[in-house]
Structures are given as C-alpha cells and as structure tokens.
Image (cartoon, rainbow, N blue to C red):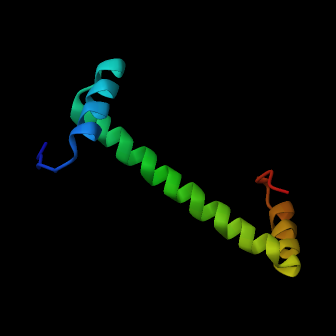
Amino acid sequence: MRTTTIRIDAETHARLQRLSKETGQTLIETLRDAAEALGRQHFAYRVANELAALRADNASWNDYLAEADSTSVADGIR
C-alpha cells in the first residue's frame, strides 16, 4: 500500500486517534472508513435533493411513480 502525508489540526488528529483506539483499527483504517462514510453521506444528500426536486414537479413525480410501479423491484418511496 502506498501512503501519503496529510496535514490536519491537532484536535481532529486526537479525535481520529480516539476513534481508532475505540474500534481497534489503525489510524489509516479509521481515515479510510471516515472518507467512505463522507462519500456515502454526500451521495445520500444528492439523492435526497434530486427526489425533492422531482417531488416538486407533480407531473414528473407521477411519471416517476408510474415507472417505479412498472418495475419488478419497487423502491418503496412515496
């Protein structure tokens, strides 16, 4: 594995070290998990915003629901 150095403030470093100790992970594993969680959070925000925009347009929302109903796997969003 190739590594690099990043600069963070002392408070964030201490927080990451505490998290690492609590989970029994290395600092690198903790940072990797944090980056993954942040990526998932940003994805969820984008999806929520796109759904909100879709819901704001009744015709588009109804088209979406009709298409969702016609698929074999419903998304459960109403």
**Residue 12 appears at what percent x and percent y?**
29, 40
Image quadrant where residue 48 sits: bottom right
Pick the quarter of the image with the C terminus.
Answer: bottom right
Q: Residue at x 22, y 36 (%)?
A: 28
Image position of 6 with respect to 1: above or below: below
**Residue 42 appears at what percent x and percent y?**
50, 57
Q: Is residue 4 left or right of residue 18?
A: left
Image position of 47 with respect to 41: above or below: below
Give 36 or 10, whichever is nearer the viewer: 10
Image position of 1 with respect to 57: above or below: above
Give 7 or 63, whichever is nearer the viewer: 7
For the image shown, how many numbered marks are present on the structure?
0
Q: Residue at x 21, y 39 (%)?
A: 10
Q: Residue at x 27, y 38 (%)?
A: 11
Image position of 34 with respect to 71: above or below: above
Pick the quarter of the image with the N terminus.
Answer: top left
Q: Residue at x 16, y 50 (%)?
A: 7
Image quadrant where residue 29 sits: top left
Q: Is residue 14 left or right of residue 19?
A: left
